[in-house]
Image (cartoon, grey):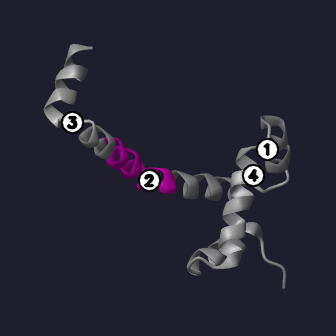
């Protein structure tokens, strides 16, 4: 029985840090390094419902990871001695 990429991704997502999961992440990273033309060419080989599901899954991950960037920036600012009030005052002045 053959599995689609989405089905494979769902199975791999259930595994914690398996070699397959790491390889899938590397595959996605490599896809992100490809030219727009190559990505579009590959996407044309995938059904529209599958593309929509991929987009949805990526949007979910983006929303989940937004906090990571905010936390990292806050930590860096705290190390530099910049308080939240200082930063708010700076943004208000712009």
Determine which residue is flagged by label 2.
65
Query: Comparing marks 4 and 3, which lies closer to the viewer?
Result: 3
Measured in 3D between alpha carbons, the distance from the residue under mark 2 to the one under mark 3, in whole angstroms, is 25 Å
Query: Comparing marks 2 and 3, which lies closer to the viewer?
Result: 3
Of the image marks 2 and 1, the number of the one nearer the N terminus: 1
Which contiguous range is marked in magenta?
A: 60-73
Query: Quarter of the image containing the N terminus?
Result: bottom right
Query: Comparing marks 1 and 4, which lies closer to the viewer?
Result: 4
Determine which residue is flagged by label 3.
81
Determine which residue is flagged by label 4.
30
Callout 4: SS: helix
Please say if 81 is above or below 54. above
In the shown orientation, is residue 59 left or right of residue 6?
A: left
Measured in 3D between alpha carbons, the distance from the residue under mark 1 to the one under mark 4, in whole angstroms, is 10 Å
Please say if 55 is above or below 83. below
Checking the image for residue 39, the label placed there is 1
Looking at this rendering, what residue extends furthest in the front direction? 80
Q: Look at the magenta stretch and give its main secondary structure.
A: helix
Measured in 3D between alpha carbons, the distance from the residue under mark 4 to the one under mark 3, in whole angstroms, is 38 Å
In the shown orientation, is residue 48 left or right of residue 60?
A: right
Q: Residue at x 27, y 42 (%)?
A: 79
Q: Are marks 1 and 3 in contact (CB under 8 Å)?
A: no
Residue 28 x %, y %? 70, 56
Q: Are marks 4 and 3 in contact (CB under 8 Å)?
A: no
| Residue 12 picture quarter | bottom right
Of the image marks 2 and 4, the number of the one nearer the N terminus: 4
Looking at this rendering, what residue extends furthest in the bottom direction? 1
């Amino acid at each position: 029985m053959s599995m689609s990429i989405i089905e494979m991704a769902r199975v791999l997502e259930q595994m914690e840090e398996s070699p397959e999961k790491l390889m899938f992440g590397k595959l996605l990273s490599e896809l992100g390094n490809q030219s727009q033309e190559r990505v579009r060419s590959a996407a044309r080989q995938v059904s529209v419902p599958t593309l929509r599901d991929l987009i949805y899954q990526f949007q979910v991950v983006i929303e989940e990871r937004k906090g990571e960037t905010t936390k990292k920036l806050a930590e860096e600012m705290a190390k530099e001695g910049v308080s939240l009030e200082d930063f708010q005052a700076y943004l208000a002045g712009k």
